[in-house]
């Protein structure tokens, strides 16, 4: 993929992410696991999201803005955000922490960077998931004013907790 120009790489990356999401929904909702055995369905979904997080972190889109250092863009933040809504807080924390730790081990980061990244993910995803699951009302549609406000507050919690931890 490194031989392609930047717009082509971004397009391939986008198509890959869409294909993964489609595969996930087909595999979870059309599989025999979704027909009643909830614990297996949650386990399968959690393992699948761990794989998604590792792949998303392992293969970032790298670009070089004019007169600046190298920058990387991954979709792992959006995946962690989704994990905090899909799973209960405990499972969300486990999924995100394991995905972050595996990626840091694969990329051979120092142990203290691995520890910091994993702690950051645990705190951020944990707070976001707690806020979402505490205030979200399942009986209301997702686009109701209340649930949209909950999503906005959870997004703010995610952004500000991660920003505060990273930048003080």
Image (spheres, rainbow, N blue to C red):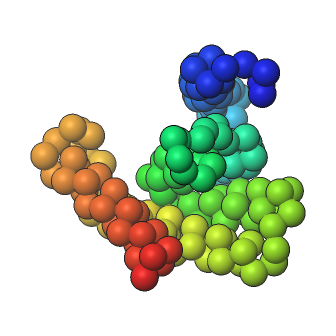
Q: Is residue 137 left or right of residue 71?
A: left
From the top left corner, tell me how far across and down residue 125 is, in percent: 50, 65
**Foreground pick, 67 / 108:** 67
Answer with the quarter of the image where residue 52 lies.
top right
- Quarter of the image containing the N terminus? top right
Answer with the quarter of the image where residue 91 lies.
bottom right
- Quarter of the image containing the C terminus? bottom left
**Foreground pick, 36 / 128:** 128
**Which residue is at 42% across, 69% downward?**
163
Answer with the quarter of the image where residue 61 lies.
top right
From the top left corner, tell me how far across and down residue 37 is, in percent: 66, 43
From the top left corner, tell me how far across and down residue 106 is, in percent: 86, 56
**Which residue is at 19% across, 53% downward?**
149
- In this rendering, the answer to whether 18 lies above or below 101 is above
From the top left corner, tell me how far across and down residue 151 is, in percent: 29, 52
Q: Is residue 80 left or right of residue 61?
A: left
**Foreground pick, 85 / 16:** 16
- In this rendering, the answer to whether 163 lies above or below 64 is below
**Which residue is at 57% across, 73% downward?**
120
């Amino acid at each position: 993929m490194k031989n392609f120009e930047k717009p082509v790489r971004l397009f391939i990356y986008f198509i890959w992410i869409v294909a993964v999401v489609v595969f996930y929904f087909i595999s979870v909702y059309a599989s025999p696991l979704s027909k009643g055995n909830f614990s297996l369905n949650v386990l399968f979904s959690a393992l699948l999201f761990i794989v998604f997080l590792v792949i998303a972190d392992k293969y970032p889109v790298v670009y070089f803005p004019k007169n600046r250092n190298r920058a990387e863009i991954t979709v792992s933040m959006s995946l962690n955000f989704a994990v905090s809504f899909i799973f209960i807080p405990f499972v969300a924390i486990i999924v995100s922490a394991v995905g972050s730790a595996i990626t840091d081990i694969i990329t051979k980061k120092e142990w203290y960077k691995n520890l910091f990244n994993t702690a950051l993910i645990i705190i951020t995803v944990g707070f976001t998931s707690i806020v979402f699951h505490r205030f979200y009302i399942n009986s209301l549609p997702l686009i109701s004013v209340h649930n949209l406000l909950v999503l906005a507050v959870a997004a703010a919690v995610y952004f500000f907790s991660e920003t505060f931890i990273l930048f003080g």
